[in-house]
């Protein structure tokens, strides 16, 4: 088979999943890789054939998306041209992780496509947040359209929802507790994080920043430029983790059995939905980073509660089950998940 694997590059979650999925696909066929966006810090040991600007968002400084910068970064004319010219007809199958250009190109040219993303889990009516955010759910549904959709989530809802894929760097990492707390909140400015967390005096904070290019020290707070290896070492040796309510970092913190507190980005559908599920699981959720929330953060620090999860490595079996029908369509029916 000739396969195109396309994923969204506006965060580390899609890239970390690609690390695990692509080697399995390469043992089953010829694989080309497409990435939209470049806001990920995970190194990928693959040749990337298509590097696109895509349709991403820009992190703000006050806990949400910078809408003005996001709109300025969009080039819809160029996106449309890419959709028209992307040679998806060359492939027997496209596997898509929330990447819009290849998804729309496949839709227009009737090319087989399988969608694998954590966003798909939010479209399942058994998801706790399904009845909320209806307009946002429509945007997610048509952002990267596909007939066959499978989702990843913190817990399963149906046969089309899988548990998270854990990359090997996390799965086989030894953990310790050196007493510090790891913080990753890219939608807040470093100044805001320092101003708020410095009020909690007796805690060592290791804050990873997309905005800083060098180490900075503020009493009990260390600001570190985002680096994947350093970030993994920090989480693995931490006492707890504070992060947004995305998918990759909360999943990895839970897998490493670290105490977790999440602060969902404002007006970001996926994170708001994830926060609902994480709260159901027992994870502490704080509405925003502010001094008013410090009592709740301090209560979490003084707690020893760790949420237990079981995320086995079933990536290969999952991929075999999903793509097997495409090897011989005269024998096996297509999978159709609405």
Image (cartoon, helix red, strand yellow):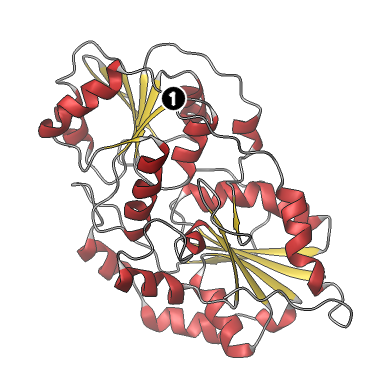
The residue positioned 79% from the left and 56% from the top of the image is: 26
Quadrant containing the N terminus in the rendered view: bottom right
Give the percent coordinates (x, y) of residue 64. 24, 52
The residue positioned 38% from the left and 17% from the top of the image is: 304
Q: Is residue 139 visible?
A: yes
Quadrant containing the C terminus in the rendered view: bottom right
Seen in the picture, residue 248 relative to 329 is either above or below; the reply is above
Q: How many marks?
A: 1
Q: Nearer the viewer, residue 287 or 50?
A: 287
Query: Is 3 left or right of 294, judged from the image as shown?
Result: right
Give the percent coordinates (x, y) of residue 225. 37, 33
Quarter of the rendering containing residue 146: bottom right
Query: Is 290 left or right of 27, judged from the image as shown?
Result: left
Seen in the picture, residue 138 relative to 223 is either above or below; the reply is below
Q: Where does label 1 land, which residue?
A: 306
The residue positioned 10% from the left and 33% from the top of the image is: 292
Quarter of the rendering containing residue 291: top left
The residue positioned 85% from the left and 72% from the top of the image is: 327
Secondary structure of the residue carrying numbered label 1: loop
Give the percent coordinates (x, y) of residue 269. 33, 60
Q: Is residue 213 visible?
A: no
Query: Is 304 left or right of 228, judged from the image as shown?
Result: left
């Amino acid at each position: 088979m000739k396969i195109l694997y396309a994923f969204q590059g506006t965060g580390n979650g899609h890239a970390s999943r690609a690390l695990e999925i692509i080697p399995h696909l390469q043992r089953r066929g010829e694989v080309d890789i497409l990435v939209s966006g470049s806001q990920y810090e995970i190194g990928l040991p693959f040749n990337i054939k298509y590097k696109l600007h895509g349709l991403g968002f820009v992190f703000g400084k006050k806990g949400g998306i910078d809408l003005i910068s996001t709109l300025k970064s969009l080039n819809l004319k160029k996106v449309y041209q890419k959709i028209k010219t992307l040679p998806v007809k060359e492939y027997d199958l496209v596997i898509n992780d929330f990447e819009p250009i290849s998804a729309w190109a496949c839709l227009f040219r009737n090319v087989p496509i399988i969608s694998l993303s954590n966003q798909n889990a939010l479209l399942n009516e058994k998801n706790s947040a399904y009845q909320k955010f209806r307009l946002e759910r429509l945007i997610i549904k048509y952002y990267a359209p596909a007939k066959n959709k499978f989702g990843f989530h913190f817990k399963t809802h149906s046969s089309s929802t899988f548990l998270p894929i854990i990359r090997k760097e996390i799965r086989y990492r030894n953990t310790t507790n050196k007493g510090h707390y790891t913080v990753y909140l890219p939608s807040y400015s470093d100044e805001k994080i320092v101003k708020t967390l410095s009020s909690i005096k007796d805690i060592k904070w290791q804050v990873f920043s997309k905005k800083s290019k060098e180490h900075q020290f503020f009493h009990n707070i260390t600001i570190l430029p985002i680096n994947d290896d350093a970030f993994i070492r920090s989480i693995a040796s931490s006492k707890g983790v504070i992060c947004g309510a995305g998918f990759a970092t909360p999943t990895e913190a839970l897998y490493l059995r670290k105490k977790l507190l999440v602060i969902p980005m404002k007006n970001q559908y996926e994170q708001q939905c994830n926060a609902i599920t994480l709260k159901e699981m027992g994870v502490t959720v704080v509405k925003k980073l502010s001094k008013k929330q410090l009592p709740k953060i301090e209560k979490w620090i003084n707690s020893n509660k760790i949420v237990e999860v079981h995320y086995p490595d079933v990536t290969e079996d999952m991929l075999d089950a999903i793509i097997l029908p495409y090897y011989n369509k005269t024998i096996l029916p297509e999978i159709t998940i609405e």
